Amino acid sequence: MGAGLNIDMDEAALLWAEFTHGRNASVRERLAALYMPFARMLAAKMYAGRTHHHVEFDDYLQYARVGLLEAVDRYDVSRGYKFETYAGSRINGAILSGMESYSEVHEQVAARKRIVEERMASLQDAPRPADKQEDLFGYLAELAIGLAVGFALDQTGMFEAAEPAVSHYDYTYAGVELRQLRARLKSLVNELPGKHRQVIHSHYLQQMPFDEIARALSISKGRVSQIHKEALLRLRDSVRAAPELNWSG
């Protein structure tokens, strides 16, 4: 296998002897470079049988390198077996673990994108003004405010007992106002009528898409979209009516 991959076994023996003595980082990198064709071969085999076709080969190769470096660090020359034999399972394992994590993230992103698209569609159901420019601007403003309310709800961790600490990126006054707004939104959500409260709670706290909420409430997906829009408009109007909050900032 070493010859077929153009690995110089004499050079490998010298590098392993040197690495075993001092665990030198530059020698580690030279060993990794020497065996990279082997890692690339394994990555190529797994890439050929991939199920996620949006993933690039470079992603497989990067995970293969991670497994290769781990194998270099843990390989014991004194045991007498070939490095490729030892490293193969670790390289394949690193690729599989990486792809599993990649798939989970990709699925979360896709689900998140679908939820945001549903929110947009829900708020866009209102008839659009045909002619007057000021009416069009009013429509866009209503849409933007509705989405802003939804965004603020999405960041609340609604109904949690305690507020999370403000990150070091928050400006003091903006952070205080944002916490006030979110606290007020939590209270206002509890004041919504039954199904409106359930839809907002399920969609924003539990990240449930509209079709799942529809099944849970035994209503149509279209009705969930309508309730969602009505609930956000109620919340928007309630927030606007609260003189202690600065919604425009």
Image (cartoon, rainbow, N blue to C red):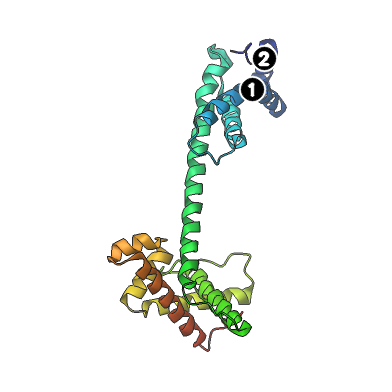
Q: Name the residue under label 2.
A: 6
Q: Is residue 248 at least partly visible in the picture?
A: no
Picture residue at 42% right of the left edge, 79% below the top: 188
On the image, the x and y values in percent for residue 39 come to 59, 25
Furthest toward the front, the residue is 131
41 w.r.t. 14: above or below: below
Q: Which of the pair 173/122 is nearer the observer? A: 122
On the image, the x and y values in percent for residue 115 come to 46, 61
Q: In which quarter of the image is residue 186?
A: bottom left
Is 166 on the left-hand or right-hand side of 216?
right
Picture residue at 53% right of the left edge, 13% below the top: 79
The disc labelled 1 sits on which kind of residue? Answer: Pro
156 w.r.t. 91: above or below: below
Which image quadrant: the N terminus?
top right
Q: State the separation of the CA atoms marked 1 and 2.
A: 8 Å
Q: Which of the pair 50/177 is nearer the observer? A: 50
Q: Secondary structure beneath disc 1?
A: helix
On the image, the x and y values in percent for residue 197 come to 36, 74
Q: Residue 37 carries which label?
A: 1
Q: Quadrant of residue 33?
A: top right
Picture residue at 50% right of the left edge, 24% below the top: 89
187 w.r.t. 60: above or below: below
Q: Secondary structure beneath disc 2?
A: loop
In primary-sequence order, the first of circles 1 and 2 is 2
Q: Residues within 10 Å of mark 2 (few under 14, many from 20)?
A: few
Is 194 on the left-hand or right-hand side of 147?
left
Q: Is residue 238 at least partly visible in the picture?
A: yes
Q: Quadrant of residue 220?
A: bottom left
Mark 1 vs 2: CB contact within 8 A: yes
Q: Residues within 10 Å of mark 1 (few under 14, many from 20)?
A: some
